[in-house]
Amino acid sequence: MYLDVLDLRNFYYRTQLGRVAQRAIRDRLVEMWPEAKGQTVVGFGFAAPLLRPYLDQARRVIAVMPAPQGVMPWPAGMENVSLLAEEASWPLETGMVDKLVVLHGLEPSEEQPDLLDECWRVLGPGGRAIFVVPNRSGFWARTEGTPFGFGRPYSANQLESQLRRHSFVPERAVSALFAPPSHRRFWLRTAGMWERAGRRFAPWLAGGVVMVEVSKQVYAPRKPGLTAAVTRPLKALEGVTVPKPLPAPRAWAVKN
């Protein structure tokens, strides 16, 4: 079940905790994708907070927001690039997307197989996608006071397995959002320290979200080779009689 777009907007843009979450995930995304010059970058769900670094360099940036969630104009003070679409029917051409970011789009969906098939369709050959989902072993998935406490949380292995079933190739998985989901001033002030510590000691700390990067690999179809049989053989020796073996020599009797 999707949250309302107004609730998501208020969390990310009007609360300090939401800004902490936005900064932590966006910094991790930019670390994985430092540039997108001349590319088409698309976000699905409520990925708008993560797309701002690509507005100046990408050829095209589009924020697709699902109909059950609702849509808002974005970015503020600039030409709108957001649109409303059904989960499994985006108004985008097949194979036009170079980079795809999914945030708050997969875990609340009730049509996940169809949604993943749509992600595959719009992604171009060799294109990349990053799925950001709540970490099932993290504290953020257990707190309903944030958008990460709704929908189905995942582990990295669970998410990779589901993406493989839809023909995606997992490339890498990272964690982010290591600060506790608390509005207390101490935790908000030390969020940067927790994020740096979490990246360094990731095997021992559970981040609030799992970020799995996948690629779309399209292989050339295999064609059958030339057949060994010759359908029209040459008839250069046509008319030549087949040689017959000589008769066996007769045994002559010796008379005394």
Image (cartoon, rainbow, N blue to C red):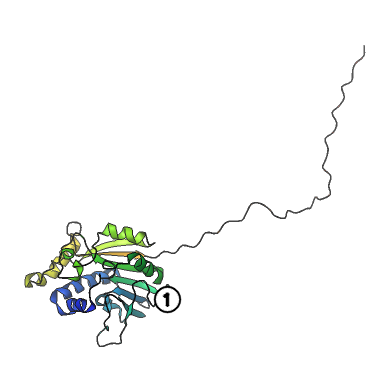
Of the 4 image quadrants, the one containing the N terminus is bottom left
Badge 1: how crowded within 10 Å, few (<14), some, or many (20+)? Answer: few
Q: Residue at x 29, y 70 (%)?
A: 102
Residue 123 in sight from this viewpoint = no
Of the 4 image quadrants, the one containing the C terminus is top right
Asked if residue 21 is positioned above or below residue 57 in the image, the reply reads above
Location of residue 161 by image quarter: bottom left
Q: Nearer the viewer, residue 199 or 52?
A: 52
Residue 248 image offset from top left, x and y in percent: 84, 28
**Residue situated furthest right in the rendering:** 256
- Relative placement, left or right, of 201 versus 238 is left
Location of residue 234 by image quarter: bottom right
Residue 253 image offset from top left, x and y in percent: 89, 17
Report the label total. Answer: 1
**Residue situated furthest top in the rendering:** 256
Residue 82 image offset from top left, x and y in percent: 31, 81
Residue 21 in sight from this viewpoint = yes
Q: Residue at x 46, y 62 (%)?
A: 219
Location of residue 247 by image quarter: top right
**Callout 1: helix, strand or loop?**
loop
Residue 179 image offset from top left, x and y in percent: 14, 67
- Relative placement, left or right, of 244 versus 199 is right
- Residue under numbered circle 1: 93
Q: Nearer the viewer, residue 143 or 35?
A: 143
Residue type at tag 1: Glu
